[in-house]
């Protein structure tokens, strides 16, 4: 059922002690999918948290008007059994929302299995404010992005290799060289650079082995599943059992590399440059920042699109 705007409650006409009880009573009377729109003379954000605490995550909250004089909020009762989108699913559907996640330090790739409410609760963030920003993204005109979520899995796997694996292979030698150089020149005055140097070497080793496993084992198997689905080859059992096994390993390795890069960002205080930073110092931090941003998209495409669809396709093929 589509939300309606005729189920309106003017909270300003109620006695203060009756406002929240009346709203709760009206919400409880809603059928699944129906909405209640409340009209108020101040931001009813405290009501959001009270409803979340007393009713749980069973509603969708949308601001229709936000002051400075009046506030209108549409509260929709979720359909039972429907699951709230995870950060990863939200990013897969609209990559523009990634900028909001980055702004608040929300992990949409390795931590993409969390819902927005779960991630905000873990970090102590204002979920209402972030939901508003995400809703603003929904309303904004959208330039046509790359349709990652619509691509065939074979095409997406090749794209990841040709774009992101190639970028990693091309960038890592330069990053390693500059990490060595900057640590040698500036390490005595900035000892955190020695830590950066060690982590960079570790990331290089981890990603090199990781990408080799994807290119030689996992991605070819995923592409074979696509070929089977098209009737181009017969189905064969894999040497590793279900595709979930290598996927779980790849996701674990994604987490390890992500934590390594988070540690670099932490020890450099978010890539803050000291006054004595030379050109190489600046270039190293710029390359590391760019590398981390690319890795976020790289891991997102795998964790939130390629891997779940491969698991679903395999299950469908072996069910027949």
Image: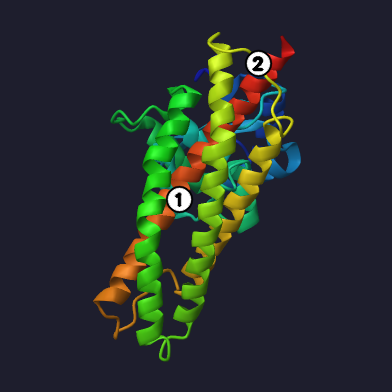
Instruction: Check the image and report above or below for 70 versus 179.
Output: above
Count of numbered labels shown in the rendering:
2
Front disc: 1 or 2: 2
Could you say where residue 277 lies in the image, as x and y percent from the top left?
30, 81
Any mark on residue 89, and which? none
Any mark on residue 235, and which? 2
Q: Nearer the viewer, residue 105 or 11?
A: 105
Residue under the point 62% across and 41% down: 113
Dividing the image into 4 quarters, which one contains the N terminus?
top right
Instruction: Check the image and report above or below for 167 versus 14.
Output: below
For the view shown, which residue lies furthest in the left direction?
279
Q: Nearer the viewer, residue 164 or 114?
A: 164
Dividing the image into 4 quarters, which one contains the C terminus?
top right
Tag 1: Cα neighbours inside 10 Å, few (<14), some, or many (≥20)? many
Q: Which residue is mark 1?
A: 295
Contact between marks 1 and 2 (CB within 8 A): the answer is no
Q: Splitting the image into 4 quarters, where does residue 275 fall?
A: bottom left
Could you say where residue 204 lies in the image, as x and y percent from the top left?
49, 61
For the view shown, which residue lies furthest in the bottom direction?
188
| Colour convention | rainbow
Instruction: Name the secondary structure under disc 2.
Output: loop
Q: Is residue 101 visible?
A: yes
Q: Nearer the viewer, residue 186 or 19?
A: 186
Tag 2: Cα neighbours inside 10 Å, few (<14), some, or many (≥20)? some
Dot 1 or dot 2, earlier in sequence: 2
Residue under the point 54% across and 68% down: 263
Could you say where residue 125 lies in the image, as x and y percent from the top left?
56, 55
163 displayed left or right of 216: left
């Amino acid at each position: 059922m589509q939300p309606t705007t005729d189920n309106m409650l003017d909270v300003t006409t109620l006695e203060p002690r009756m406002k929240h009880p009346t709203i709760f009573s009206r919400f409880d009377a809603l059928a699944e999918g129906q909405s209640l729109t409340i009209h108020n003379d101040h931001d009813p954000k405290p009501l959001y948290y009270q409803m979340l605490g007393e009713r749980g995550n069973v509603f969708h909250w949308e601001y229709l008007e936000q002051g400075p004089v009046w506030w209108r909020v549409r509260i929709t009762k979720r359909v039972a059994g429907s699951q709230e989108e995870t950060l990863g699913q939200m990013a897969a559907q609209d990559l523009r929302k990634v900028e909001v996640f980055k702004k608040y330090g929300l992990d949409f790739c390795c931590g993409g299995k969390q819902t927005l409410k779960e991630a905000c609760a873990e970090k102590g963030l204002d979920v209402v404010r972030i939901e508003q920003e995400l809703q603003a993204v929904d309303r904004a005109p959208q330039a046509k992005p790359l349709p990652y979520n619509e691509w065939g899995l074979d095409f997406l796997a090749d794209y990841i290799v040709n774009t992101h694996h190639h970028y990693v292979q091309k960038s890592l030698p330069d990053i390693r060289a500059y990490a060595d150089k900057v640590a040698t020149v500036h390490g005595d005055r900035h000892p955190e650079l020695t830590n950066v140097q060690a982590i960079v070497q570790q990331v290089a080793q981890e990603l090199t082995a990781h990408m080799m496993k994807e290119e030689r084992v996992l991605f070819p198997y995923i592409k074979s599943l696509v070929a089977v689905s098209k009737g181009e080859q017969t189905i064969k059992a894999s040497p590793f059992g279900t595709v979930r096994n290598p996927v779980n390993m790849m996701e674990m390795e994604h987490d390890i590399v992500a934590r390594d890069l988070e540690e670099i960002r932490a020890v450099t205080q978010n890539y803050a440059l000291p006054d004595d930073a030379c050109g190489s110092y600046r270039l190293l931090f710029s390359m590391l920042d760019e590398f981390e941003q690319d890795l976020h998209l790289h891991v997102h495409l795998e964790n939130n699109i390629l891997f779940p669809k491969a698991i679903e396709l395999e299950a469908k093929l072996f069910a027949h």
